[in-house]
Image (cartoon, rainbow, N blue to C red):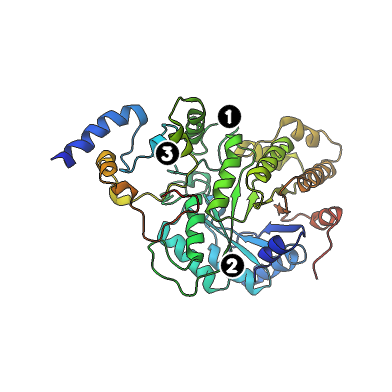
Amino acid sequence: MLKKLLPFVEHVIKKPVWDCRMCGQCVLHSTGMTCPMTCPKTLRNGPCGGVRENGNCEVIPDMPCVWLKAYDRKVFLPLPTVWKDHFNELRPPVDMRLQGSSSWINLVTKRDQQTPAGWSTTDGAH
Amino acid sequence: MSQMREKLENTNEVVFTAEFPSLDGGGMAKVEKNAARLAPWFVGVNATDNPAAHAHASNTASAIAMKMHGIEPIMQIVCRDKNRLAIQADMMGAALHGIDNISLLTGDDVTAGDEPESRRVFDIDSTQAINIARIITTGKYLSGRKIEPAPDFYISAVENPAAPPFDYRIERALKKYRAGAKYLQLQICYHPDRLEKFCAGVAKIAPDLKLIPTIVLVKSSKPMSFMNDKVPGIDIPQDTINRVSSAADQTEEAYKLTVELAKHAMTLPSVRGLHVTDFRHDDSLERFMYDLGQKPRN
């Protein structure tokens, strides 16, 4: 029951505020409270090289680059330092199986921290 | 052993790289012709992967063809067209043919190409792809499945030193270095001040990361205006375009500007070479290389 209800509640709250795409493995806290899944290339580790001179997106020229917003917010928002410190961590590939599930449940169960067996990083991130 | 690795890791030599023209028709004769033109000057040459979102002969097939003709390929893999399975297959395909240099890129969006109706993949991003290449060199796939013996990739990536957010570009270079990139080829940059700041920043936080800025040979202001107007991520100051467009001899002025940019770039910290592009049908390559103090290899 909770598994069905929570994704709905989460979507109702997070869609209007962050344009949440329900990837099920939320990283908002580490990306300046800006959802990287709203980047047309769904980049989770920073902007591509196509950011325009005016700061807008390569793909949608009248939209500000998602990562430009993320970086500005990381710098200027009064976010916890630990969150800011996570900005440059290497975020693992998205687990496509979690699409549509509640990231809140996945956070509590730590399902969102599961990575492929071969995944490792040199910067200490999971 | 990869000459790119040998030169960049074990010598102080300036390393020049180039872009192999995309292959469509013309078979191996075309490969041979281009290989003969590039071999005297370049340590490594990029085998591109559907550049600007246009389909061509594949990255792996092109890289193999180049290798057969005496060119050391730097095989690019972009994240736009392939999921993580296909990207690892590209890497292992390269390893199978003794191709050590691989370069991982996000890739232009499908909307930049001539088939904008395509599905964009971006299953993983470039930094994750770099990290996966590094993982493969430890003897396993992303899944953890063993690879014996492990391929010995010399991993690189690209970065744009002149696109916003400027400060973050330096941190992103460090991120790519930590993921496994040993050097970065940089996007075309007509802002010497931005390039300077980027290189200084990288030298400070990732001193072992080597940088190879890109220099593009142009004959007039027309391609400059084209890049400025049509290529997201490249900005060329109007004054710079005017300098060339208002000159009595545009070709000569464009050449002078290019040499100035190249010489400036080579003085910057962490810069170990130059990536030279867009000289197809351009007869100034030899003159350019000699003016930079280079002599043909072998």
Which amino acid is tagged 2?
Asp
Which amino acid is tagged 1?
Asn
Cα distance, mark 2 to mark 3? 32 Å
* In-front residue for pair B20/B199: B199
Q: Is any atom of residue B232 visible in this view? A: no
> Quarter of the image holding residue B15?
bottom right
- Crowding near the residue tagged with mark 1, few <14, some 14–19, many ≥20 C-alpha atoms within 10 Å: some
Q: Which residue is mark 2?
A: B100
- Taking the spot 31% from the left edge, 31% from the top edge, the residue there is A15
Task: Kindly indicate whether the residues beneath marks 2 and 1 are on one polypeptide chain.
Answer: no
| Residue A54, numbered label | 1
Chain of the residue under the numbered disc 3 shown in the image: A
Residue A53 is situated, as x and y percent measured from the top left of the image, at 60, 32
Residue B88 is situated, as x and y percent measured from the top left of the image, at 45, 63
- Crowding near the residue tagged with mark 3, few <14, some 14–19, many ≥20 C-alpha atoms within 10 Å: many
> Quarter of the image holding residue B205?
top right
Residue B93 is situated, as x and y percent measured from the top left of the image, at 50, 69
Cα distance, mark 2 to mark 1? 38 Å
Chain of the residue under the numbered disc 1 shown in the image: A
Task: Kindly indicate whether the residues beneath marks 2 and 3 are on one polypeptide chain.
Answer: no
Chain of the residue under the numbered disc 2 shown in the image: B
| Residue A36, numbered label | 3
| For marks 1 and 3 on the same chain, the one whose residue lies earlier in the sequence | 3
- Taking the spot 17% from the left edge, 36% from the top edge, the residue there is A5
* In-front residue for pair A99/A122: A122
Cα distance, mark 1 to mark 3? 20 Å
Q: Secondary structure at mark 1?
A: loop
Which amino acid is tagged 3?
Pro
- Residue B48, placed above or below residue B215: below
- Front of the two marks 2 and 1: 2
